[in-house]
Amino acid sequence: MLDLIIRNGTVVDGSGSPGFAADVGIADGKIVELGAIEQPAQNSIDARGLIVSPGFIDPHTHFDAQLLWDGRAKPSMEHGVTTVVPGNCSLSLAPLKEAHRNRLVGMFNRLKKCRSKHLKRALNGIGKHLKNLSNASSLS
């Protein structure tokens, strides 16, 4: 038995091929079947008239600080983004040398009206920063 079937949607799979009508079967968090699915599922979603596609990756975001209090980057999720790549424009919170900490906190506060308590917590090394991101994600 499947966990979920998304029925009657137009699947756009990112391959460049035209969309096609299909059901999508999901078990254990993974797509396991695609097409006209006959087997039962615990839950079902009718996607008639809707597009069913994989999540989108946003390769250039400015969520570096926001992820500390909004670990799911909610503005992006509302647009179908499932993965964000922060820290790619030379203004990243980690890794960071201790000598640059106050300057970067001040810059983020001015640019993004960031919450300095979150920033200072982030700037305690890459390991702690990743742990803080993980904690923020589970709280969102």
Image (tube, rainbow, N blue to C red):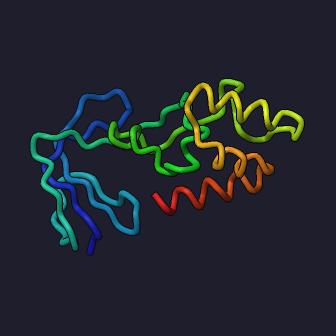
> Is residue 73 shown above or below 41?
above
Q: Please state the horizontal and vertical placement of residue 8, each as a whole percent of the image.
A: 13, 49
Foreground residue among 129 and 9: 129
- The residue at 54%/42% (across/down) is 66
Foreground residue among 14 and 94: 94
> Is residue 106 shown above or below 74?
above
**Quarter assignment of residue 12:** top left
Foreground residue among 6 and 76: 76
- The residue at 26%/75% (across/down) is 1
Q: Is residue 78 left or right of residue 11?
A: right
Q: How many marks?
A: 0
> Is residue 83 shown above or below 16?
below
Foreground residue among 115 and 60: 115
- The residue at 74%/32% (across/down) is 104
Report the residue that reaches farthest toward the left.
48
Q: Is residue 134 left or right of residue 18?
A: right
Q: Please state the horizontal and vertical placement of residue 109, each as a whole percent of the image.
A: 63, 32
Q: Please state the horizontal and vertical placement of residue 74, each as a whole percent of the image.
A: 40, 45
- The residue at 41%/38% (across/down) is 76
Q: Is residue 69 left or right of residue 96?
A: left
Q: Please state the horizontal and vertical placement of residue 38, each as a whole percent of the image.
A: 15, 65
